[in-house]
Amino acid sequence: MAFMLNSARYMSSKLFVGGLSFSTDDTSLKEAFSGFGDVTDAKVIMDRDTGRSRGFGFVNFADEEAAKSALTAMDGQDLNGRSIRVSVATERTSPRPFSGGYGGGEGGGYGGGYRGGDSSY
């Protein structure tokens, strides 16, 4: 309980919402949290390759008291058939390192260029 009191003292007005159903979109996320105060933005994070929800999102409130009320009331509640987790959002400290794709660096392709030898047929 002491942790909750300490975190509430330094609380942000931005909440992380995890465990979202794939059917939850920005509008339904905003509607679910708007009863606690003025929601300035609600965003479900989408996978850039598939276009599907990644199962989490963020809700921004106009003030910290509304965010605090929403966190307390909504954490563990059902939204579109899924039990959601709500916590204070934290900013990334540094960008993620690139860890995918097709590699890089040198090589690849078909080579090309003169390799010596007799080119008369």
Image: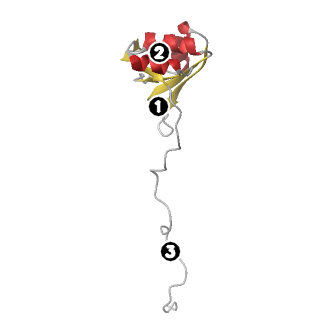
Q: For marks 2 and 3, give the one nearer the viewer.
A: 2
Which residue is labeled 2 in the image? 71
Instruction: Give, as a three-letter code, the residue at label 2.
Output: Leu
Mark 1 surroundings within 10 Å by alpha-carbon count, few (fewer than 14), some (14 through 19), many (20 or more): few
- The mark that comes first in sequence, 3 or 1, is 1
**Nearer the observer, 33 or 81:** 33
How far across and down, in percent of the image, does residue 28 sit? 52, 15
Q: CA distance from mark 3 to mark 1?
A: 39 Å
Q: Which label was assigned to residue 52? A: 1
How far across and down, in percent of the image, does residue 104 sit? 49, 61
How far across and down, in percent of the image, does residue 18 sit? 42, 24
Position of residue 80 in the picture relative to residue 119 (left or right): left
Q: Residue at x 47, y 15 (%)?
A: 71
Q: Residue at x 49, y 92 (%)?
A: 118
Helix, strand or loop status at disc 1? loop
Q: For marks 1 and 2, give the one nearer the viewer.
A: 2
Which residue is labeled 3 in the image? 111
Q: Residue at x 39, y 12 (%)?
A: 77
- The mark that comes first in sequence, 2 or 3, is 2
